[in-house]
Amino acid sequence: MIITHLFFLLSALSRFESVPNALCKTKESEIGDFTNLVLATFYLPTHCLRDNPKPAVGPVRGAPEFTIHGLWPGRTADDWPQCCSPESIHRASQLRNVTDLVKYWVSTKGSDDKLWAHEWEKHGTCGMNLFRTENAYFNATVELLKRIQLDRILYKYGIQPSSKEYSNQLVSSIFNRALHYKPILECSTINQTSYLSGLYVCLDVLWPYDVVACPSDYYISKQNNCPDKFRIPPYPSSCFRS
Ligand SMILES: *[C@@H]1O[C@H](CO)[C@@H](O)[C@H](O)[C@H]1NC(C)=O
Ligand SMILES: *[C@@H]1O[C@H](CO)[C@@H](O)[C@H](O)[C@H]1NC(C)=O
Ligand SMILES: *[C@@H]1O[C@H](CO)[C@@H](O)[C@H](O)[C@H]1NC(C)=O
């Protein structure tokens, strides 16, 4: 009896693993059809303030403030390939040996696994000419964020997460100086106050994936929406997962 149940459970699981997921039902774009990569980051303390994650969700202690949203193959701000290989479904087993994954790539909304599946299946599969496997895509993305060190840039120029307001011009010029290109800064409004919620960095499509200028339409896109002044808050301690 138990054996039979186990058998059905296992065959149900393996069937689940081999069907295309709900996100990418059909192939929408071609692998490799893009001209830049966008390292999309969250300024995660703001997501904590906005999402109030449940105890099992959110950052681990020691997480940087800027964490990964995804690495997106793109052409312009509103033109990117997606769902390039519906058969290449997310497998948690592919990510087991990616160092620091949970420190650098977390969700404040639901399980990390759901975020990872979404990023890989929708965006990562389109970059399979560069990162052939899910393991390579996640590893490379974590390495890229570690290399760019967005948190250190803020600290180096004297910005500590706090309840202070900073001018958009100051924050932009700091990142501009450190990265050599103007970043795309995204803000969220919570209780009528603006908070930094994300930063987008455009990268070359060739190794070593240097920072490059973003396509110009990014600067007028809905992502680049920070007002003249906004806050850069610290992590609320209630945010860390227990
Ligand atoms: C926004 O307002 C709600 C209701 O007063 C409050 O519970 C919440 O803590 C506030 N959030 C922030 C980030 O100020
Ligand atoms: C990590 O795991 C993946 C998937 O099992 C494997 O393909 C890859 O070779 C491993 N990498 C290292 C450095 O062990
Ligand atoms: C990730 O990539 C780096 C640099 O390419 C490599 O040194 C490291 O072994 C990789 N780690 C895993 C877990 O695949």
Image (tube, rainbow, N blue to C red):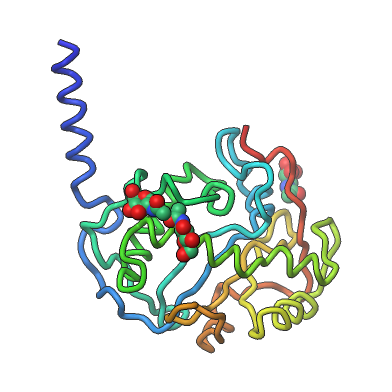
Q: Is residue 163 above or below residue 33?
A: above
Q: How many numbered dots are placed on residues in this image?
A: 0
Q: Which of 112 and 218 is in front in this view?
A: 112
165 sits left or right of 102 in the view: right
Locate the N terminus by quadrant. top left
Quadrant assignment, res 222: bottom right
Residue lying at 20% horizontally and 62% vertically, measured from the top left:
26
Quarter of the image for the C terminus: give it.
top right
Question: Residue lying farthest top?
Answer: 1
Q: Is residue 70 visible?
A: no
Could you say where residue 86 lies in the image, as x and y percent from the top left?
23, 59
Q: Which residue is drawn at 56% across and 34% down?
A: 56
Query: In the picture provided, is 97 more to the left or to the right than 148?
Result: left
Is residue 167 depicted above or below 164 in this figure?
below
Q: Nearer the viewer, residue 230 or 102?
A: 102
Q: In this view, does 178 lie to the left or right of 133?
A: right
Q: Where is residue 38 in the image (x, y as percent from the top left)?
A: 49, 73
